[in-house]
C-alpha cells in the first residue's frame, strides 16, 4: 500500500478516540494529518462498546461528557452519517442509604453544572423500569439527558468529518516504531514504510502502552477483560427504555434489539496481558467465561426477574484499557516531546470521545479545552507505576471500583506499599493509618481505625483523632513524615536565569533563602506551586508535591538551557516537618544552631545537627505555624525521628498525618495544587499575588497574560469560609451558592477544633467578575446533597491572618 511520506501529525489508532482526535484537529484547521489504523476503523475495543453515554459522570468529566452528548446529534447533521444517538435517559438505583446519599451529593454537583436529574422513590423507579424488582432498593437518581450511540457509526461519522476537511484516514497499516530525534518526535515506521512527522497522537487503546515503549515513554495502562451478555427479545423491553444501572449489584443494562444487554463491572476483574491477545485482533472477542460472570448475571436476574426466562444470544468479552487510578491518560509525554497520548478510557471512551478529541486538539492547537485536563495528565505517573506486575495487580481492582461506593477516603487495596518512607514501619507500629498518593504510602492520621475509608458522607470517625493532631500543632508540637515530597537539585551556570524565566517569584535571592513560587503557562494559569531554595549561587533545591513530581520535572527540563542539570533526589532524603508552637524549643534541644528569628529567619535554611544527624533545616510552614522541614539523608531518618521524639516528650510531641496537615493548611488559607490551583486559574484569582514579581529583570512565562487578566476584576476567586459542624461534612466538589444561585465548588475542607467549625476553601466565579462587593453582599451556602447549609465567608485567614505565628 502506498502512503504519504510525511505529515504534520500522525494519529495512531482508528478507534473512537483516534477518529475524534482527527475530526477535532481538522475542525481547528489542522488538516495535514494521517490517521493510521492497523485493521479497520473501530476494530479494536470500540466495536464492543455498549455505547452508553451517562451524563452524570465524576465532576472533572462533566463538561467533557456533555460536550460529547451535544456533539453526537450535530455530527449526524454535519456528516450525514448516523451516530445512533438516542436520548433514552439513565436510571441508577440504590440498595443502601449510603449509596443514595452519594447520589444526592453527585446530583447537587451535576445541577451546579447545569444538569437536570431527580431523586426517585422505589415506586417511581418502577414506573420508569416496570420490569424491575424494587422491594430491595431505597431509591435512585434519574437523569433524562443521557443516551446511547452506535459506537461504530460514531467512529464512521468522526472519520467522515475529518476526511471531508482533508485528513487522510488509512486502514490496514500498522505503526511498528516511533522515531525520535534529539528527544522529540521525528516520525513513525509503519508496515507500509516510514512517515516523517512532527507530532504523534497515540490513540491505540490497549496497545498504547506498547507503542509508547518503542520510544521509552511511560503510558501506564493495562487491559482487562470486560463482559456483557445479550439476550433475545423480552416482552416489555423496548427501544425507548432508559439505561439502568445497579452498582450495588455491579451491573448495568439497556435495551438491545428488543432484548437486554446486561453488563458488569466485577470486583475480581480479569486483567489480561497483551501477549495473550492475538496480534491481528480485529473485531475479535476474548473467550467466554460463564463461571466468572455467573454471580453478576445472578444479580441481574434478581433485579429483572424476566431475565430468568430470557434466551441468551451471546456473551461478549472485549478488552478495554484501564489505568492505575481509573482516570484517563491525556497529554504530551515527558519522555518524548510532541508525543501526545489519549488512552486509558476505563470503559468510558465512547461517552468521552467528543470531549477528549476536542481537548487534545485544543492543547495541540493552542486553544481552550472544554474541560480541565490537568487532572488526567499522563505526567501524574512515572516509571515506578509503569511496571507489568504492579499494573496487572492494580487493574483487576480498578474495574470493580467503577461501581464501588466512593466513600470518602476510599483507597486502593492492591498495588500498595510501592514507595515507602524509611519511617514507614515505625509509624505503622504507632498506629498510622495510611493512604496512598502517586505510589507513596503516607500517614493520614494516627490511632485506631479500620482503614482510610470513612463509610459515611457525614462526620468521619477519624474527626477526634485528627482534631487532636491539629491541636498538637497549635498548642504544642507535632511531627509529620513528608518524605513523599519530590526533591530536585537544579544547577548550572544558567540555572538562575532558567528559574527566573519559569518562576513567578524572585529567585535571585541570597544563598540560604527559600522562595514559594508558581510555574505558569502562557495563559497565566498555574502549572504548579512549589518552593525553590538557593543552596549556592548556581545550585537550587526544588521541592514539590508527590503528585507534581513528574510534571514539574518535565516543565523545568522543557524550559531549561542545555547547561542546566536537574537531578531527582527524592529517594536520597526523607522529610520530617517539626511544626507547632513548641517546635523551636524542641529542636533547640537537639542542635547548637540558634533558631530564633534573628539568627534563623522565616524562609531561610541552614544545615543543622538534629541529635546525631545532620539535616538541611528549612524554615517554612505548610501548617501556618512555627516550624521547620528537615531534609535528612534517608538512611538517617529513623535516627533523626527517634532523637526528635526523645527530646520532644517534655513538650508533648506527637505524630500527625495528612488529614491534620490538610485542616491546618485550610485554616491558614494556604492553597494547594490540584485543589485550589490548576491551569484554569491564575495567581491573582487564587489570591496569590504576593508570589508574582512583575518587576523582575527577566520576564517570566505567563507574565503578559497575567497583566491582561489584571485589567478587570478576577473572573474567579478562591475564598475561605466556615460552617457549623452538625451532621454534615465537606469532602470537596460541593456546590457553593450565592443568593441561591450556583457560583462555585468547594475545593478543600477540614475541621478547625479551636473554632469548632468546618473551614473550607472554594472557587467562586461570576461572568461579571468577582470583586469584594460580590463577596460581601450576597448570602452564601453550600449544597450538601440537597441540604443548603449557611456558610460565612472570611475576608482574612481563619488562623493567624498576619502570619505572626509562623514568623515568630
Ligand atoms: C464490553 C465493553 C463495553 C463497553 N461499553 C461502553 C459504554 O457503554 N460506554 C462507553 O463510553 N465506553 C464503553 N466501553 C469502552 C469503550 O469501548 C472504549 O473506552 C473505547 O472504545 C476506547 O476507544 P479507543 O479508540 O481508545 O480504543 P480502540 O477502539 O481499541 O482503538 C484503538 C485502535 O488502535 C489500533 N491500533 C493498535 N495498535 C496499532 C498500531 N500499532 N498501528 C495502528 N493502529 C493500531 C487498533 O486496531 C484499534 O482500532 C466498553 C468497552 C467494552 C470492552
Image (spheres, rainbow, N blue to C red):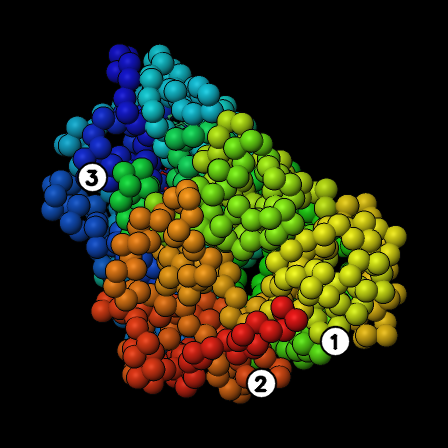
On the picture, is 438 further left or further right than 692? right
Position above or below: 554 against 464: above
Which residue occupies the extreme front position in the image?
A: 598
Q: Residue at x 26, y 16 (%)?
A: 4
On the picture, is 617 further left or further right than 135? right
Q: Nearer the viewer, mark 1 or mark 3?
A: 1
Q: Residue at x 83, y 69 (%)?
A: 648
In the picture of the structure, the residue carrying the numbered disc 1 is: 476
Nearer to me, 788 or 538: 538
Work out whether mark 1 precedes mark 3 in sequence or the reverse, and give the earlier one.
3
The Cα–Cα distance between marks 1 and 3, rounded to whole angstroms, is: 58 Å
In the rendered image, the quadrant that contains the C terminus is: bottom right
In the picture of the structure, the residue carrying the numbered disc 2 is: 755
Work out whether mark 3 precedes mark 2 in sequence or the reverse, and give the earlier one.
3
In the picture of the structure, the residue carrying the numbered disc 3 is: 28
Q: Residue at x 81, y 75 (%)?
A: 652
Q: Where residue 551 sits: x, y (%)?
A: 50, 43
On the picture, is 260 further left or further right than 759? left
On the picture, is 126 further left or further right than 749? left
Q: Answer whether residue 672 is visible to the viewer in this image.
A: yes
Nearer to me, 528 or 180: 528
Q: Nearer the viewer, mark 3 or mark 2?
A: 2
Q: Quadrant of ligand 1?
A: top left
Q: Where residue 68 sits: x, y (%)?
A: 26, 51
In the rendered image, the quadrant that contains the N terminus is: top left
| Element marked by disc 3 | loop
Q: Where residue 171 sits: x, y (%)?
A: 29, 24
Q: Residue at x 36, y 29 (%)?
A: 200
Q: Where residue 57 sits: x, y (%)?
A: 38, 60
Work out whether mark 2 precedes mark 1 in sequence or the reverse, and give the earlier one.
1
Amino acid at each position: 500500500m502506498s502512503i504519504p511520506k510525511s505529515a504534520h501529525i500522525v494519529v495512531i489508532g482508528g478507534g473512537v478516540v483516534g477518529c475524534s482526535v482527527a475530526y477535532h484537529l481538522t475542525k481547528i484547521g489542522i488538516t495535514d494529518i494521517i490517521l493510521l489504523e492497523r485493521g479497520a476503523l473501530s476494530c479494536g475495543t470500540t466495536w464492543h462498546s455498549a455505547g452508553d453515554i451517562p451524563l452524570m459522570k465524576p465532576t472533572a468529566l462533566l463538561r467533557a461528557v456533555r460536550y460529547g452528548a451535544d456533539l453526537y446529534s450535530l455530527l449526524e447533521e454535519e456528516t450525514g452519517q448516523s451516530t445512533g444517538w438516542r436520548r433514552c435517559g439513565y436510571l441508577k438505583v440504590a440498595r443502601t442509604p449510603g449509596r443514595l446519599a452519594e447520589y444526592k451529593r453527585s446530583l447537587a454537583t451535576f445541577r451546579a453544572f447545569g444538569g437536570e436529574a431527580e431523586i426517585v422513590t422505589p415506586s417511581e423507579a418502577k414506573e420508569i423500569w416496570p420490569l424491575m424488582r424494587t422491594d430491595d432498593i431505597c431509591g435512585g437518581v434519574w437523569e433524562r439527558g443521557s443516551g446511547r450511540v452506535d459506537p461504530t457509526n460514531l467512529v464512521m461519522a468522526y472519520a467522515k468529518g475529518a476526511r471531508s476537511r482533508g485528513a487522510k484516514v488509512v486502514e490496514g497499516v500498522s505503526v511498528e516504531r516511533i522515531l525520535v530525534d534529539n528527544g522529540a518526535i521525528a516520525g513513525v515506521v509503519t508496515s507500509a514504510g516510514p512517515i516523517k512527522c512532527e507530532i504523534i497522537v497515540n490513540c491505540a487503546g490497549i496497545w498504547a502502552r506498547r507503542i509508547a515503549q518503542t520510544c521509552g515513554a511511560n503510558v501506564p495502562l493495562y487491559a482487562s477483560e470486560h463482559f456483557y451478555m445479550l439476550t433475545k427479545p423480552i416482552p416489555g423491553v423496548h427501544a425507548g427504555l432508559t439505561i439502568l444501572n445497579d452498582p450495588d449489584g455491579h451491573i448495568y443494562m439497556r435495551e438491545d434489539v428488543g432484548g437486554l444487554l446486561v453488563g458488569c463491572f466485577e470486583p475480581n476483574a480479569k486483567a489480561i496481558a497483551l501477549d495473550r491477545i492475538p496480534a491481528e485482533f480485529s473485531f475479535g472477542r476474548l473467550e467466554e467465561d460463564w463461571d466468572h460472570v455467573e454471580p453478576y448475571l445472578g444479580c441481574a436476574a434478581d433485579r429483572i426477574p424476566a431475565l430468568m426466562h430470557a434466551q441468551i444470544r451471546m456473551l461478549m468479552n472485549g478488552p478495554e484499557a484501564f489505568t492505575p487510578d481509573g482516570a484517563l491518560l491525556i497529554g504530551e509525554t515527558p519522555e518524548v516531546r510532541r508525543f501526545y497520548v489519549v488512552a486509558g478510557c476505563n470503559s468510558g471512551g465512547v461517552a468521552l470521545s467528543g470531549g477528549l478529541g476536542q481537548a487534545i486538539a485544543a492543547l495541540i492547537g493552542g486553544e481552550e479545552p472544554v474541560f480541565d485536563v490537568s487532572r488526567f495528565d499522563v505526567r501524574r505517573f512515572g516509571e515506578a507505576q509503569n511496571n507489568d506486575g504492579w499494573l496487572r495487580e492494580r487493574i483487576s481492582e480498578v474495574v470493580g471500583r467503577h461501581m464501588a461506593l466512593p466513600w470518602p477516603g476510599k483507597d486502593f487495596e492492591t498495588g500498595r506499599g510501592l514507595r515507602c518512607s524509611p519511617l514507614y514501619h515505625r509509624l505503622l507500629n504507632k498506629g498510622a493509618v495510611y493512604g496512598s498518593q502517586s505510589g507513596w504510602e503516607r500517614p493520614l492520621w494516627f490511632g485506631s481505625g479500620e482503614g482510610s475509608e470513612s463509610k459515611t458522607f457525614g462526620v468521619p470517625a477519624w474527626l477526634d483523632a485528627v482534631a487532636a493532631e491539629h491541636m498538637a500543632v497549635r498548642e504544642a508540637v507535632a511531627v509529620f513524615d513528608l518524605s513523599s515530597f519530590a526533591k530536585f537539585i537544579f544547577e548550572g551556570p544558567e540555572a538562575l536565569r532558567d528559574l527566573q524565566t519559569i518562576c513567578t517569584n524572585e529567585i535571585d535571592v541570597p544563598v540560604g533563602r527559600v522562595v514559594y513560587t508558581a510555574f505558569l503557562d502562557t495563559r497565566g494559569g498555574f502549572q504548579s506551586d512549589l518552593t525553590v531554595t538557593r543552596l549556592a549561587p548556581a545550585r537550587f533545591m526544588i521541592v514539590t508535591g508527590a503528585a507534581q513530581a513528574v510534571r514539574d520535572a518535565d516543565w523545568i527540563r522543557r524550559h531549561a538551557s542545555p547547561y542546566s542539570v536537574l537531578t531527582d533526589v527524592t529517594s536520597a532524603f526523607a522529610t520530617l516537618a517539626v511544626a507547632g508552637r513548641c517546635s523551636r524549643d524542641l529542636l533547640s534541644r537537639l542542635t547548637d544552631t540558634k533558631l530564633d528569628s534573628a539568627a534563623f529567619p522565616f524562609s531561610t535554611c541552614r544545615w543543622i545537627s538534629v541529635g546525631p544527624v545532620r539535616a538541611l533545616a528549612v524554615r517554612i510552614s505548610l501548617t501556618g505555624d512555627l516550624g521547620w522541614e528537615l531534609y535528612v539523608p534517608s538512611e538517617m531518618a529513623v535516627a533523626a525521628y527517634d532523637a526528635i521524639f526523645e527530646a520532644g516528650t517534655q513538650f508533648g510531641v506527637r505524630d500527625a498525618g495528612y488529614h491534620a496537615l490538610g485542616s491546618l493548611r485550610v485554616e491558614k488559607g494556604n492553597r494547594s495544587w490540584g485543589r485550589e490551583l490548576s491551569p484554569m486559574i491564575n495567581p491573582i484569582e487564587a489570591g496569590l499575588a504576593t508570589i508574582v514579581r512583575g518587576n523582575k529583570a527577566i520576564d517570566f512565562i505567563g507574565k503578559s497574560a497575567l497583566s491582561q487578566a489584571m485589567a478587570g476584576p478576577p473572573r474567579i476567586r478562591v475564598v475561605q469560609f466556615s460552617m457549623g459542624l452538625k451532621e454534615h461534612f465537606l469532602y470537596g466538589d460541593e456546590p457553593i451558592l450565592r443568593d441561591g444561585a450556583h457560583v462555585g465548588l468547594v475545593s478543600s475542607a477540614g475541621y478547625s477544633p479551636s473554632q469548632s467549625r468546618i473551614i473550607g476553601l472554594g472557587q467562586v466565579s461570576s461572568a461579571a467578575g468577582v470583586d469584594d462587593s460580590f463577596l460581601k453582599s450576597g448570602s452564601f451556602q453550600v449544597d450538601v446533597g440537597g441540604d443548603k447549609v449557611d456558610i460565612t465567608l472570611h475576608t482574612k485567614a481563619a488562623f493567624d491572618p498576619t502570619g505572626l505565628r509562623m514568623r515568630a
